[in-house]
């Protein structure tokens, strides 16, 4: 099971997300980072644990108010050992082809299934099935037709983000059963190691987390419990400034 830290960026700062009410988000204050600058927050995550992936929500792009592309590109250069799952709303597909970037297509900002059909077999495409309580946000065809789903699917419970409500286990179990061999990730509500254990038991491939990392409810010992045995001895990913930057140009060879 993979634990994936989350950063929500608005106007160059990482926000404290709560219940999906984006208008109320404020710059984060965390014991993991001295400031709300994205490199500081990511470095704080990496000091806590050698994570392999980071989920980045570009709130400005999702809301159609510009984007944080430059800041995200800077992260890919500064942390060359990390992969980034980038949700940029309607601009997500602009990230196709960048090394170590997976583009997240959120159902909330999708108008139809055409984009998903185009990305159906793309290993770097991720579909986020977005829910607010019991309401699915997006074209019903995306929820009803699992044949449209790419190999990776996120089940996003927006109302549970940052409020310690616990994951939506019943919905996760249903999506996992329907998803077949696809990898399904839980997002929203993870409180502690007990939640992770329950998610693992129902077959989730991983979980997106933020608040539980910042408030210390998930410590390194908790994270190590859910790390594959062969990964535990791997060296820590380099922190900011400890490895040379790599080019952010589009890749021209397959990974």
Image (tube, grey):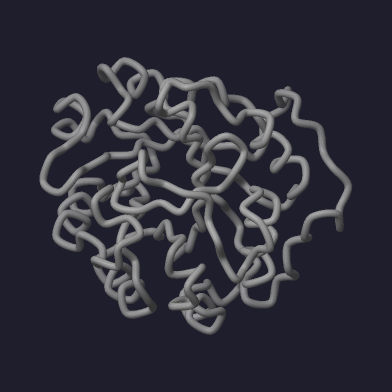
Farthest-out residue, bottom: 221
* Number of disc labels: 0
Rendered location of residue 125, percent (x, y): 46, 33
Residue 225 as seen in the image, left or right of residue 198: right
- Residue drawn at x 32%, y 55% as measured from the top left: 161
Location of residue 212 (image quadrant): bottom left
- Residue drawn at x 42%, y 27% as measured from the top left: 89
Vertical position of residue 164 compared to residue 62: above or below: below
Give 81 or 209, whichever is nearer the viewer. 209
Quadrant assignment for the C terminus = top right
Vertical position of residue 16 compared to residue 248: above or below: below
Quadrant assignment for the N terminus = bottom left
Vertical position of residue 90 compared to residue 133: above or below: above
Location of residue 169 (image quadrant): bottom left
Give 31 or 124, whichever is nearer the viewer. 31
Give 162 or 200, whichever is nearer the viewer. 162
Rendered location of residue 47, percent (x, y): 69, 69
- Residue drawn at x 33%, y 69% as measured from the top left: 200
Residue 242 as seen in the image, left or right of residue 186: right
- Answer whether residue 177 is visible to the viewer in this image: yes
Rendered location of residue 59, percent (x, y): 46, 35
Vertical position of residue 201 compared to residue 40: above or below: below
- Answer whether residue 123 is visible to the viewer in this image: no
Residue 255 as seen in the image, left or right of residue 168: right
- Residue drawn at x 37%, y 50% as measured from the top left: 183
């Amino acid at each position: 099971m993979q634990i994936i830290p989350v950063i929500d960026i608005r106007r160059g700062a990482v926000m404290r997300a709560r219940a999906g009410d984006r208008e109320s988000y404020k710059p984060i204050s965390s014991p993991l980072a001295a400031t709300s600058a994205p490199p500081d927050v990511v470095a704080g995550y990496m000091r806590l644990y050698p994570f392999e992936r980071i989920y980045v929500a570009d709130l400005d792009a999702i809301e159609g108010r510009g984007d944080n592309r430059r800041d995200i590109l800077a992260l890919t250069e500064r942390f060359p050992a990390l992969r980034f799952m980038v949700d940029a709303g309607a601009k997500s597909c602009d990230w196709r082809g960048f090394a170590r970037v997976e583009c997240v297509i959120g159902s909330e900002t999708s108008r139809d299934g055409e984009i998903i059909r185009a990305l159906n077999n793309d290993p770097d495409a991720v579909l986020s099935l977005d829910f607010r309580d019991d309401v699915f946000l997006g074209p019903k065809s995306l929820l009803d037709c699992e044949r449209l789903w790419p190999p990776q699917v996120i089940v996003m419970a927006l109302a549970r983000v940052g409020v310690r409500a616990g994951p939506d286990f019943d919905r996760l179990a249903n999506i996992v059963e329907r998803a077949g061999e696809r990898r399904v990730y839980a997002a929203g509500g993870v409180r502690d190691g007990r939640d992770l254990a329950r998610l693992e038991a129902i077959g989730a491939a991983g979980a997106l987390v933020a608040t539980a990392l910042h408030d210390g409810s998930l410590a390194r010992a908790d994270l190590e419990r859910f790390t594959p045995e062969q990964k535990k001895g791997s060296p820590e990913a380099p922190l900011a400034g400890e490895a040379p930057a790599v080019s952010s140009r589009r890749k021209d060879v397959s990974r």
